[in-house]
Amino acid sequence: MIITGPSATRPPAGLPGLDPASSRLVEVDGAGADAGSRRTWHVLDTGAALERRGITPVGTIVAVHGNPTWSYLWRALVTASLARADAGDPAWRVVAVDQLEMGFSDRTDLRRTLDQRITDLAGLVDALGIHDPIVTIGHDWGGPVSLGWAVRHRERLAAVIALNTAVHHPDDAPLPFPLRVATARGVLAAGTTGTTAFLDTTLALADLDPAVRAAFRAPYATAARRRGIGGFVADIPATADDESTPALRALSAGLRDLDVPALLLRGPKDPVFLESHLDDLLDRLPHADVHRYEGAGHLMAEERPYAEAVLDWLAEKGVVDAGSPTPAQPTAEVPDADEPAPAPLWEALTARRDDDDVAVIDMSTGSGGAGLRVSWRQLAARVDELAAGLDVLGVRAGDRVSLLVPPGPTLTAVLYACLRIGAVVVVADRGLGIRGLSRAVRGAVPDVVIGELAGLSAARALGWPGRRLSAAALPAATMRALGVEASLADVARAGRGQPLPAPPTADADAAVLFTSGSTGPAKGVVYTHRQLSSLRDALAEHFDVGPDTGLVTGFAPFALLGPALGTRSATPDMDVSAPRTLTATAVAAAVRASDARIVFLSPAAVRNVVSTAAALGPEERAALARVETFLSTGAPVGTPLLRQAQQLMPNATAHTPYGMTECLLVADVTLPEIEDAAESGDRGVCVGRPIGRGRVRIAALNADGRATGTPTTDAGVTGEVVISAPHLKRGYFRLHLTDREASRDLGDLRGRWHRTGDVGHLDADGRLWIEGRLPHVITTPEGPVTPVGIEQDVEAVSGVVRAAAVGVGPVGRQVVVVVLEREPGARRAGVASAGLGEVVRAATSQPVAAVLVVPSLPTDIRHNSKIDRSRLSAWAERILAGERPTAP
């Protein structure tokens, strides 16, 4: 059935996911410019369904679509809310409206401005007799309409929710490109009303099922029925003189006084509503919870399970039927927040500001192989100059500063300068690849980008937000072309002799550190000053770091902690974004230059250091023999490799600390302890006992491989590793749902805890064993199986270099498949020979359904050691189904 008339009507039958029983028509008296009229709206309303069930709702969710969608956008929320009510959960009535001129509501001759649409919505809410409390949710231009109603009816409001929208447009900024095209003279009428171009373009922003796409198109079959689409576009307030600009300014200003719970959900691939729009909303609603669905776009509601997220969030916020929300409670008590704050990270710089001893050595620069040396006096002065200069340039506490500078004296100075003035440093390394790096930087919405030429060129080409500063002096023409306003030398000159602003508080945000992206899109991990200082203190205490210790680090996360620890630090000559470029001679040269007693390397770096050891001369070997502590962290390090590394540093105690970006130090174990633990018969990688005040619990796995048990310290329980420490992250950057998942089902545990996603167990001596990642657990009919123990068995087979155990098949009925690298290497991927398969199966007690070989296993870039088992599992399933073998 094709709808062509101007009158309101119900949608045609058979639209996927839409229950016709929820569809109704409502007559409403016009108001404002529409006074004296009688208009008919089409809405989706679960009120009657709840009444038939005898269920009284706790409140009403009023859902407002944007342009050019209609109430069909909210069908998942309609369905999910009724399912929750049937399950006995708090029942929310959902009223999803078709705005007038849109969807299946009336078409009229009135030109509806933003102010009028807010007035229209108020009339509908009154006509429906909706009882408080009310939650509004809006998408696209339904965001300003719903939020405008919220600002005008604060006394009735319980919470606000917004998906991909905006409430403010700077007078001097152009509209986003798609809207500039849509509003261009000669294009607006033809593109929005005369043809379906605007509608088609919007629907193409998501990969929609053809039947769903047809359902969105159903109300807009004729030009007459599309006039509302054109009217919406024409009403976009792009300048101060536009008719709807006063209404938009009023509602955006009113949001600053809106103290109800707020939830902002965003698809970052939206070409219309940008990260800057989300930033603006957060400036007005700083208490809002935010979640960015990585990979989703403008029609996020069609791409992600937003409805469940919305209902879960409402339950968490405790909105009650009295109409006023219970004040939001933190997800966990923070016991360390009231304790005396540790000294700030720059404390040692301040204490040694008159010291001419060496503070930092960069072996990749300098002359004569000695490296570039910077004294404590020079470093402290440079930090002060840069800090004051950034303040002169208008960089303020809380501003996010993306640092695209490799580890070395320059990065060290600018990082401490940012921390000193309270700016939040954003660190994402090149190991993410250009796409991953761009996604991370754009997602962090930096106010300032500081980089070298390559990073600044990428910022310009990829449209990264933020002012731009150059690490090095550039020709004037280059600076203009890249939009660079100053170099760090210019910043330092501007700050010379200028006073420093007040330092940040201990609980202010200090840094956003991005994960490696080895287990999904890289996530921004937020640390406060207190937590970073606690990390420094834990490291100093556990490894006995003093002023004369000296530190060589080829592991980027710790390359910047030397000045905080008050000890000299050296970075070897290497590409820190590619750890396998580090050689044994480079490590020895850095040790000799710094007289370091501690060497800190990533597992990938260790492997190449060992493989290049033959190039070491007597003096270099003698320097390595003076090392007292050797550490490798970031991924598991096999005992044979650890032994080989210690042979190069024979007098060092070899440690393999366990941690992650969310908590860089969790536990620690030495090589002798690993060898002792090997006699216990436990399977997995022993990572030792918690460091300092850290705590570890295990949440047991169920048959489906999900961690559902109450976290326990009982020995022998295999499950998800749950951790707590003073230096544990504050949370994730704009990933509310990820934060919630990381702290779910903690029982009566107090304090800040984090579900790591790692799987393991505690032994009878309190040591932690890691057995893999939660997504990689193999759910066999006999129960969940973890991969690392199988891989250790297989890697003991002669000729096997590395192995990965993965599950193939449906959850609960998976079989184990082993994929391996061998020596000599396989020329192409495929099924292992019968003889090799037989040897591999005999090596492990776990039944193995198939053995496959590959030239190389897929690993992450940062560590070159974390195997992508999820990718391998999907690949193995295709190969075993008969697909032609290709590289995974």
Image (cartoon, rainbow, N blue to C red):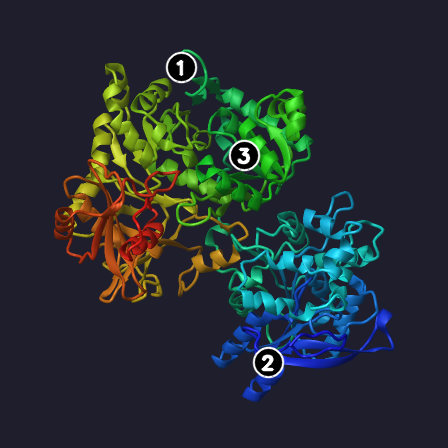
Q: Residues within 10 Å of mark 3 (few under 14, many from 20)?
A: many
Instruction: Give the Cα distance between marks 1 and 2.
Output: 77 Å
Above or below, 25 relative to 395: below
Q: Quadrant of the N terminus?
A: bottom right
For mark 3, what is the residue? 403
Q: At which x and y percent is residue 422? A: 59, 39
Q: Residues within 10 Å of mark 2 (few under 14, many from 20)?
A: some
Mark carried by residue 20 = 2
Q: At which x and y percent is residue 29? A: 81, 79
Tell me: 53 left or right of 640. Answer: right
Q: In the rendered structure, which amino acid carries the disc numbered 3?
A: Leu
Whether tag 1 and tag 3 are in contact, CB under 8 A, the answer is no
Tell me: 219 left or right of 774. Answer: right
Q: Which residue is drawn at 77% across and 65% down?
A: 227
For mark 1, what is the residue? 370
Specify which label sits upstream in the sequence, 3 or 2: 2
